[in-house]
Amino acid sequence: MASRDIEFDAEGVTLRGWFYPAEGAAGTAPTIVMAHGYSAVKEMYLDRYAEHFSGAGLNALVFDNRNFGDSDGTPRQEIDPWAQVRDYRTAITYATTLPETDGNRIGIWGSSYSGGHVLVVAAIDRRVKAVVSQVPLVSGYDNLRALVRADLLDGFREQFDADRLARFQGDPPAMVPVVAEDPLAPSALPTPDSWQWFTETGKTRAPNWKNEVTLRSVEMLAEYNPIAYIDQISPTPLLMLPAKNDVLTPTTLALGAYEKAREPKKLELLPGGHFDAYVKGFEASSTPALEWFLKHLAP
């Protein structure tokens, strides 16, 4: 079944995306609310997941994060994790107004940065009845320290403070690349697989993806710790899907966070690295997610 374009108001900002109706549904069906990770836009494989869910009798609502892709919002290319969390909740509200949606059967799916967001949303929004968190960022504090050498952290802080003063004085936000070919060059996601996936996927699927974010986006990443909420998700069922060899959101951090979560919960390790989930590991990542939603959102 074909998707349709959607747009909805999120506290004065118009967010845009796609709605995939559940195939074969007689009456209302569960709806899975989905958004992408750090700087990514919906064309970067979210359509594949939505089609997978829709084909099995679930509605899927996909949207671009504010300030990115087809959604409105300024400053452009700024990632505020808490604004994105609120937008997930607004998307849930919007989903419940659609005639296809059973408002008592809402699931949320997130990956990478949004894999952290869904942990927070599931903990604080009881409308959510099942959550899937794929290759999640669980702690910006720990993640930054895993990726950035200790002797370089103070340099980051000086840049953050200088940018804060410049913005206060009316200057435009400082920008940094999302990825760089040289992993030692300044970038928000300084791993070789990040460079490869974003540049290749940007060319082949998402020409509206831009290789830049505001410097403040990196500062807010460093301050964002979804792990603080993970023990509050219960009794909402949680499926966590870390990748075995994740060097961007390190596997060990996700496994440590999973230990803090309460039942009902399930862990499945995905093959390969962080970005394999979307492409050659798509079957391995989408199948358990679908099974989890069908199990916990069935009539």
Image (tube, rainbow, N blue to C red):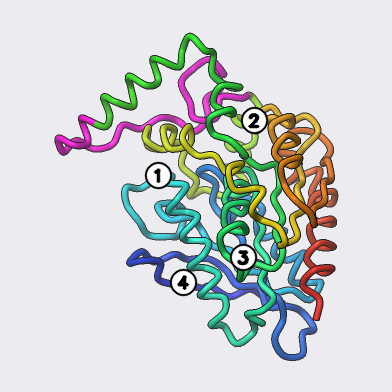
The residue nearer to you, when weighing 179 against 157, is 157
Give the vertical position of 33 relative to 211 (above or below). below
- For label 1, the residue is 77
Q: Identify the disc placed on residue 33.
A: 3
**Side (left or right) of 219 relative to 291:** left
- Which amino acid, mark 3? Val
Give the vertical position of 255 relative to 62 (above or below). above
Indicate the quadrant containing the C terminus: top left, top right, bottom left or bottom right.
Answer: bottom right
Q: Position of residue 192 (x, y in %)?
A: 64, 24
The residue nearer to you, when weighing 111 against 117, is 117
**Side (left or right) of 288 relative to 142:** right
**Alpha carbons under labels 3 and 4: distance apart:** 14 Å
Q: Give the mark nearest the N terminus, 1 or 4.
A: 4
Q: Position of residue 159 (x, y in %)?
A: 33, 22
Q: Residue at x 74, y 71 (%)?
A: 54
Q: Identify the disc placed on residue 208.
A: none
Q: Give the mark nearest the N terminus, 4 or 2.
A: 4
Q: Find the magenta span and give its range.
A: 165-191
**Alpha carbons under labels 1 and 4: distance apart:** 19 Å
Check if mark 1's residue and mark 4's residue have beta carbons within 8 Å. no
Q: Nearer the viewer, mark 3 or mark 4?
A: 3
- Which amino acid, mark 4? Glu
Q: Position of residue 102 (x, y in %)?
A: 66, 82
- For label 2, the residue is 248
- For label 4, the residue is 7
Indicate the quadrant containing the N terminus: top left, top right, bottom left or bottom right.
Answer: bottom right
Check if mark 1's residue and mark 3's residue have beta carbons within 8 Å. no
